Amino acid sequence: MSFDLADFSYSRQRPQTRVVDEIRHFTISVRSQTIGLPVDCVKTIFYLDKLTPVPLAPPEVAGLANLRGRIVTALYLDRCLRIDSDEDQRQSLLAVGITHNGEDYALIVDDTGDVIVSENADRISCPAHLDPDVVGLMSGCYRYDGGFLSIIDIASLIKRVSQQCNATHGVGAARNSTKGAGQ
């Protein structure tokens, strides 16, 4: 009797593998709150040495920075998310570098954490106590560590900051255009 290994391996029943929709999030800390970022948008973590202020920018825009020869728009994530803070003096500026639609941004955070894996079954509705404007910046919430983890929707965040910049710039342009009108 001959024994063929190929026949044997195909004739055995294989255990069923459970397909789980896993989502990976990079955790960050902002004013002692843990928040998640989609892993695929995070490019680097670095300290900002020098920021160039942007005139007429909304308070969410910290300034412009040079990251390996590229100009990066730095955003105060706590201000974007309307997280109150008594302390406005930051000792060092830790940033998470992200790319959105070919543009580079730095989200200024307090600390970085681990990459965690969530399952779709852990997804929950955003809690009712959250500010509706902030909920508009979230792509979802997941059960995490006895509480929940809000995941930032990068596209919504950038869109809101861009709209604020345009509104601020429009007001400034209107003010500047009337300065010389009566002279």
Image (spheres, rainbow, N blue to C red):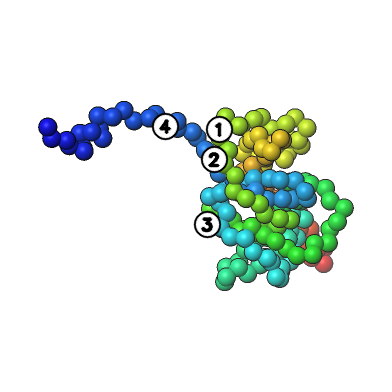
Pick out the residue farthest to the front.
1
Element assignment for label 2 = strand
Element on which disc 4 rests? loop
Image location (x, y in percent) of residue 36: 64, 45
Badge 1 vs badge 2, beta-carbon distance below 8 Å = yes
Q: Which residue carries the number 2 mark?
A: 23
Number of marks drawn: 4
Spatial separation of the CA atoms under disc 4 and disc 2: 18 Å
Work out how far the residue at label 1 is from the one at label 4, CA to CA, in angstroms.
17 Å
Q: Position of residue 158 (x, y in %)?
A: 63, 50
Q: Quadrant of the N terminus?
A: top left
Residue located farthest toward the right when viewing the structure as drawn: 86
Pair 3/1: label in front: 1
Residues under numbered marks 3 and 1 in contact, where contact means CB atoms less than 8 Å apart? no
Whether residue 153 sits left or right of residue 101 in the image: it is right
Horizontal side of 175 relative to 12 (left or right) equals: right
